[in-house]
């Protein structure tokens, strides 16, 4: 395989992107428009009833973001005209047949013109309703591959994290992470549908349905060895893709924990508080004295995902005979531990403390007490938050609200804290390493092309990340600026 120029590869291409309002999809769209303005078209599929609603979402949730400020600066007064020529927002629903595109002529145009499909549509909530997660993450994959069968395309599928010591290998149909039971996607889908029908027959409230379906998602995920419904349904989606893709050239990108932008279009941009960043923010607000986790746990992070995806697409166009899976992360070649993040967070927030509601600086504890189990954490917060309240004389308590209300508030706080710890326990106690030989081979092959412009613009070498500089001067400042409320 011989690489050319990514710039030339993208020239004249038409790319269809699902999940266009998502974090990675925004980064992909911005990067392509910035490095190759001669792209023919980007069809951006957004969850919407019609094109008008899709256009509004594109403007409000994509183009209005600060991420696009560099591109706006490049085009100045011509920005709106440029965008109107290159982007087309399409209302869709990936969980239904034909991706929910109701306009027949529009659907036929997409089928005829699309060169590449990037499926970034996903619900990434760890505690999502099983029916919602299955519809988007699992059945969405089937609908995407059925759509792609009518195109002459390359397809990139962004998959969620797998757990354990994982090679860059595909899931076999029916494979589980614990080996305790045979996974049947049809049965999982049937169980989900039957539970919904049962709840509807009982005239259950929407709140009850949501609660039951979320709990069912956790139960089914854990049964097969997955830590949450997000990872479970994404894995099933990958199984479907590999079984049904036929001759369609397919790339599966498995990014690990995604952090803020490393350098492009500018350092530190992030949207929302994500995974490990929740603990950084809690620490900065003085609310993280203890947590489940180990200081030795490696945080497998990725902040150059888009670069690797674009280079992988170029590689696939040169040799489309097999499916390739790429792990995009840092644990193998440039490990970064919880202890490193804790020390750097302490340095940052000591020098640049957050302020409380009264404008006073928040003091952070130097060290977090890490606990090796959720049960240990539960005992601790019960002792701290609940036991002191027992036996209090309500009549003697001078307070603006009743003891019962105060007790209820404490119970809610404990429940929320326990929920967070259960969701993040697999990540905070994770002891595996992700193999990335495919990604490294891709990088080395690209290096041999000796295109200095591409090497600089499409770097995804994790060893080039200086974690101290990045966390202190890029990531935490970006997190505070763009995500902390």
Image: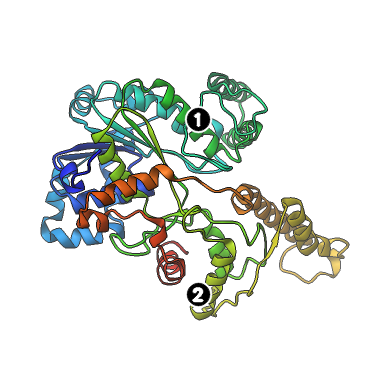
- Asked if residue 157 shows in the view, the reply is yes
Whole-percent x and y of residue 22? 38, 46
Please tell me in which quadrant of the rendered image residue 17 appears.
Answer: top left
Whole-percent x and y of residue 31? 26, 52
Whole-percent x and y of residue 369? 69, 66
Whole-percent x and y of residue 152? 23, 25
**Residue name at image x 72 percent, y 64 percent:** 401
Please tell me in which quadrant of the rendered image residue 106 appears.
Answer: top left
Q: Is 138 left or right of 45, judged from the image as shown?
A: right
Describe the element under mark 2 as helix, strand or loop: helix
Mark 1 Cα-neighbour bin, 10 Å: few <14, some 14–19, many ≥20: some
**Residue name at image x 31 percent, y 22 percent:** 247
Nearer to us in this view, 456 or 274:
456
User: Label for residue 348?
Assistant: 2
Residue 148, above or below 428: above
Nearer to us in this view, 206 or 472:
472
Figure disc tally: 2
Q: Are marks 1 and 2 in contact (CB under 8 Å)?
A: no
Nearer to us in this view, 63 or 461:
461
Residue 113, above or below 1: above
**Residue name at image x 62 percent, y 60 percent:** 296
Residue 125, above or below 451: above
Q: Is 296 left or right of 344, judged from the image as shown?
A: right
Q: Earlier in the sequence, mark 1 or mark 2?
A: 1
Describe the element under mark 1 as helix, strand or loop: loop
Circle 1 residue: 171
């Amino acid at each position: 395989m011989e690489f050319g120029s990514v710039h030339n590869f993208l020239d004249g291409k038409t790319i269809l992107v699902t999940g266009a309002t998502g974090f990675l999809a925004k980064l992909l769209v911005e990067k392509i428009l910035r490095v190759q303005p001669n792209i023919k078209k980007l069809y951006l599929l957004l969850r919407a009833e019609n094109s008008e609603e899709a256009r509004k979402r594109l403007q409000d949730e994509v183009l209005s973001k600060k991420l696009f400020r560099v591109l706006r600066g490049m085009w100045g007064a011509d920005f709106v005209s440029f965008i109107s020529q290159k982007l087309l927002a399409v209302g869709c629903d990936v969980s239904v047949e034909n991706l929910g595109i109701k306009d027949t002529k529009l659907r036929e145009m997409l089928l005829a013109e699309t060169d590449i499909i990037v499926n970034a549509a996903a619900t990434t909530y760890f505690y999502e309703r099983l029916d919602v997660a299955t519809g988007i993450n699992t059945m969405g994959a089937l609908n995407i591959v059925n759509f792609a069968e009518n195109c002459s395309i390359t397809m990139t599928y962004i998959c969620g994290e797998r757990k354990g010591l994982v090679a860059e290998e595909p899931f076999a149909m029916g494979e589980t992470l614990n080996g305790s039971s045979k996974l049947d996607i049809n049965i999982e889908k049937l169980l989900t549908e039957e539970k919904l029908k049962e709840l509807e027959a009982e005239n259950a409230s929407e709140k009850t349905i949501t609660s039951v379906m979320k709990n069912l998602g956790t139960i089914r995920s854990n049964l097969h060895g997955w830590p949450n419904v997000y990872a479970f349904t994404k894995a099933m989606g990958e199984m479907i893709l590999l079984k049904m893709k036929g001759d369609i050239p397919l790339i599966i990108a498995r990014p690990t924990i995604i952090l803020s932008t490393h350098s492009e279009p500018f350092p530190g941009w992030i949207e929302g508080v994500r995974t490990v960043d929740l603990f950084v923010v809690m620490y900065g607000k003085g609310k993280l004295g203890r947590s489940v986790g180990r200081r030795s746990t490696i945080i497998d992070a990725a902040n150059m995902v888009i670069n690797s995806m674009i280079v992988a697409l170029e590689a696939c166009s040169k040799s489309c005979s097999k499916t390739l899976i790429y792990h995009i992360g840092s644990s193998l070649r440039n490990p970064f531990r919880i202890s490193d993040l804790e020390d750097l967070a302490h340095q940052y927030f000591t020098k640049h403390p957050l302020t409380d509601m009264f404008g006073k600086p928040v003091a952070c504890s130097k060290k977090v007490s890490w606990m090796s189990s959720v049960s240990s954490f539960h005992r601790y917060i019960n002792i701290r938050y609940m036991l002191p309240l027992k036996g209090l004389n309500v009549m003697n308590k001078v307070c603006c609200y009743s003891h019962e209300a105060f007790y209820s508030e404490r119970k809610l706080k404990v429940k929320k804290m326990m929920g967070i710890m259960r969701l993040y326990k697999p990540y905070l106690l994770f002891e595996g390493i992700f193999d990335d030989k495919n990604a490294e081979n891709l990088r080395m092959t690209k290096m041999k092309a000796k295109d200095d412009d591409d090497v600089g613009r499409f770097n995804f070498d994790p060893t080039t990340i200086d974690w101290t500089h990045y966390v202190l001067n890029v990531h935490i400042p970006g997190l505070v600026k763009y995500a902390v409320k």
